Image (cartoon, rainbow, N blue to C red):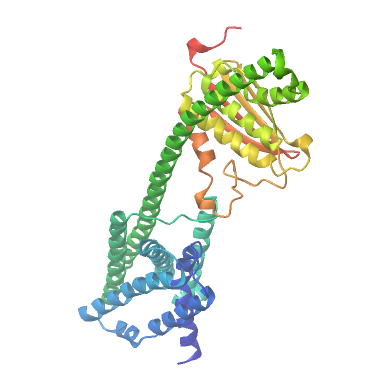
Amino acid sequence: MTLSTLVSYLLNVALFSTPTLMLASQLPARPHHVARVAASLAVLFVYLANPITNLVRGDTMEVFAAMAVYFALIVVFLVVMVLFCSRTSLWAASFCAVVGYTLQNLGSGLGELCGICLRSAGMSRGLLGNALARTVIFCSMTYVAFYFVLRKRGNKQLEIDPSKGSFCLVFGVVLINIVYDMAVKYVRLYNVPTPFNVVFRVTQVAICVYALMLEFEMLYNRHLLTEAATMARLMADRERQYEASRGNIDAINARCHDIRKQIRRLEEGSGDSQTVDKAFLDDIAREVSIYDSAVKTGNDALDVILTEKRLLGEKEHITLSCIADGHALDLMSPTDLYSLFGGALENAFDAVADIDDEDRRNISLLVRQVAGMVSIHIENYYEGTIEFENGRPRTTKEDEAAHGFGIKTMQHIVARYGGTMTMGAEDQRFYLNVLIPLPTDARSHA
């Protein structure tokens, strides 16, 4: 094997494996990942150096079929490589392999199209005149463009979970692309006029672009369905939690109210009851009054969540300051209110819980009517730094894919009422603003 041949095979290994590994890098890696990748690339090198590549010189249908199978097996190998190197499902591995092969085919097709145009213009010399160099250049450009497209998505991790049924359709499109690519190479042996070659290559590029769009549209739709189901479960959990919290708070208030009555009777009684320390009874009364002073805003659902959070604040030494016109929120259902304020205040409590200075362990909430809108403002201190992604703070949890649905659910609720929600951070203070238009008949005339 000559040096030029060795370099050619190594470049082909890189061209076929790079986009697939780019996608697979976002999947959980198996132990000894680097060694597994190296072993896979070595096997791919041996496969690409197989003497079957020498059969391209013929012009028989047997050669055509052999080469079609040869390239189809590359896709199969890429699937096995992803499964060997990453902890994932067969369908996720197939997605990575199919997208990777499609990108390689797109880059190769663009290179061939450029070569046809250069030859027809009599400019076949230089670096672009070399078929392999041309393929490397155009594939590299395609991969870099794909990388920036993924980066623009704003997700650190691509959630690869395609549905089985839809993916079979995409796999079929890729197999058609393989056959079409081989057909284009096969008809070139018959000196087809340049315009036809251009049409063939443009069609190939269009098929590749269509396949990529179909693959990611399928993945995006799957992601939306999964996200919608997750938010529906969260909303159902919130509804059950709201009903339970309302019942618990009512029961606590009723019981503590009875206890206060008993304490007052002891204080006002006679006989043996006078032996009870009055200061001790006053301390108990003050403690019980914490539970017996529920927040009253004029909206039952808001009262429940604010009372619940205020009790939590007493326990965690966190102050919740609240000025709220609960009647302004009558347009929202109790479950939506509980989900919106519950999610926002949970995030605020998590943030201030990490602060040692008790003077900064406070959360402020303001709900009011402004110019025919319901204005909600929540503000709290925080420690460290907050990174924003697509207008949302990135979760600090290790498993990013399993978190972040709370804010998405809040945004979904606000959007359902025609409102907007914005978040930001300044001078170690995080703020959340919500504006929801009031129905015409509910607007204040003050």
Q: Is residue 107 visible?
A: yes
The image quadrant that residue 305 belongs to is top right
Looking at the image, which is closer to me, 112 or 36? 36
x and y percent of residue 248 in the render? 52, 28
Q: In the figure, 40 relative to 151: above or below?
A: below
Between 114 and 1, which is closer to the camera in this rendering? 1
Residue pictured at 72% horizontal, 44% vertical: 383
Name the one closer to the observer, 32 or 372: 32
Residue 71, position in %: x, y?
33, 74
Percent from the top left, x then y, of residue 316? 68, 37
Q: For the point 31% across and 77% down, which residue is it?
A: 70
- Quadrant hosting residue 69: bottom left
Image x and y of residue 191, in percent: 28, 74
Placement of 172 over or under 333, stated as above or below:
below
94, above or below 355, in the image: below
| Residue at 56%, 26% in the rendered image | 252
Could you tell whether 226 is left or right of 301 in the image? Answer: left
Task: Give the residue at the far left of this rendering.
Answer: 61
Quarter holding residue 362? top right
Q: In the rendered image, which quarter contains the C terminus?
A: top right
**Hey, which residue is sitting farthest top in the picture?**
445
Answer with left or right where residue 114 lies relative to residue 375: left
Q: Locate the N terminus and report the quarter of the image it occupies.
A: bottom left
Nearest to the observer: residue 141 or residue 340: 340
